[in-house]
Image (tube, rainbow, N blue to C red):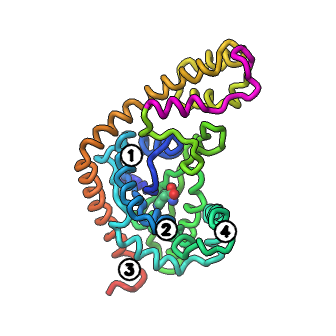
Amino acid sequence: MKETILTGIRPTGNLHLGHFFGACSNWLKLQNSHEFYLEIADVQALTDHFNDPDMVRQNVYELTTDLLSIGINPKKVHIFIQSTIPEIAELTVFYSNLVTMSRLYRNPTVKTEIAQKKALFGNDGESVTYGFVGYPVSQAADITVFKGSLIPVGEDQLPLIEQTREIVRKFNSIYGETLIEPKHFISKTARIKGLDGNEKMGKSLGNAIYLKDDEDTISKKIMSAVTDPNKIKKDDKANPDICMVYYYHKLIENNNLETVCNECKNGTRGCVACKKELIKNMLEFLKPIREKRKYYLDHKEEVESILKEGNIIAQKKAKETMAEIRHNMKIDY
Ligand code: TRP
């Protein structure tokens, strides 16, 4: 039997290169060898955006379109919407007994996010809801209801997988061996730097290249990328290791990388020419993705039916696991 993968992504915006290299490129490899459930985590998105249901709904379709455009194959991957699986909500209630409040507050991912909220909305904690603090519990339900054993995610998700493992161990020790303890899987480029040199590319940081960006937008973004600040004139020698343009040349595998590096070091390559070369390569790299994206935008009904099929398969699996769980918890009335 194939090992089962479960991973999820929140529908709060479009995919950018940070997602692509950080997590999605791994998914593309793994889809050929594994039973693969890919969850569009709308319920989780609502823990943060409960007052913006239109945004979440629209992004369910946007994100699915992006995922199909990068080459996620719906014949191999069950793409489904979290809110169509009521068992996840049910299981979240049962798991919430197995987690202490202090453990949730100690979760490094939750801790960072709470600090960000407090910085944004003031320090009184009013913005931190019960649903938000509990989302790792719901994520444990996402993973375990599909018996996911391998979880390919970005680095920031590790504390959530660890929390899931703890819940699984506790559940199994009380109710008998039922759930699978998941392993994580991280790509070697788990975190992608932004064009501005920030350690992370992110929507809120405003430093991302989106897969759907048009040519003009991409060109402008790359022209404003951060280079070695000591290189002022075209023929100044520079250090490519602190240059974001070089970083992206590497990332999308420029086949003249050695030349780029040497010319930069020797002062025989100006930044403008170097950026223009990156623009050309980046547009080429994104071209097949943009073409596929256009296809799915023109065939919205295909996207909808892919999700419908994915939902049905995921619902069946969740029902099976839930029956076992209810039996072992002695609530199978
Ligand atoms: N928390 C993840 C994120 O913010 C999304 C997610 C939801 C997820 N459910 C999951 C990831 C289950 C892995 C497994 O990106």
Q: Which mark is residue 122?
A: 4
Mark closer to the chain start, 1 or 4:
1
Nearest to viewer (mark 2 / mark 4): 4
In three-dimensional space, the C-alpha distance between marks 2 and 4, rounded to whole angstroms, equals: 19 Å
In three-dimensional space, the C-alpha distance between marks 2 and 1, rounded to whole angstroms, equals: 23 Å
Q: Which mark is residue 326?
A: 3
**Figure check: 259 above or below 217:** above
CB at mark 4 closer than 8 A to ligand 1? no
Give the residue type that dot 2 points to.
Answer: Thr
CB at mark 1 closer than 8 A to ligand 1? no
Residue 85 screen position, x and y as percent = 34, 68
Name the residue nearer the viewer: 186 or 129: 129
In three-dimensional space, the C-alpha distance between marks 1 and 4, rounded to whole angstroms, equals: 36 Å
Nearest to viewer (mark 2 / mark 3): 2
Q: Which mark is residue 47?
A: 2
Q: How many residues crowd around disc 3 within 10 Å: few (fewer than 14), some, or many (20 or more)?
A: some
The quadrant of the picture occupied by the C terminus is bottom left
Q: Secondary structure at mark 4?
A: loop
Q: Which residues are magenta?
A: 215-237
Q: Secondary structure at mark 3?
A: helix
Can residue 195 be seen from the camera position used here?
yes
Residue 36 screen position, x and y as percent = 38, 52
Can residue 140 be seen from the camera position used here?
no
In three-dimensional space, the C-alpha distance between marks 3 and 4, rounded to whole angstroms, equals: 42 Å
Q: Image point 36% across, 56% down: which residue?
A: 58
Q: Image point 72% across, 18% down: which residue?
A: 233
* Residue at the spot of label 1: 67
Check residue 127 for magenta coloring. no
Mark closer to the chain start, 2 or 1:
2
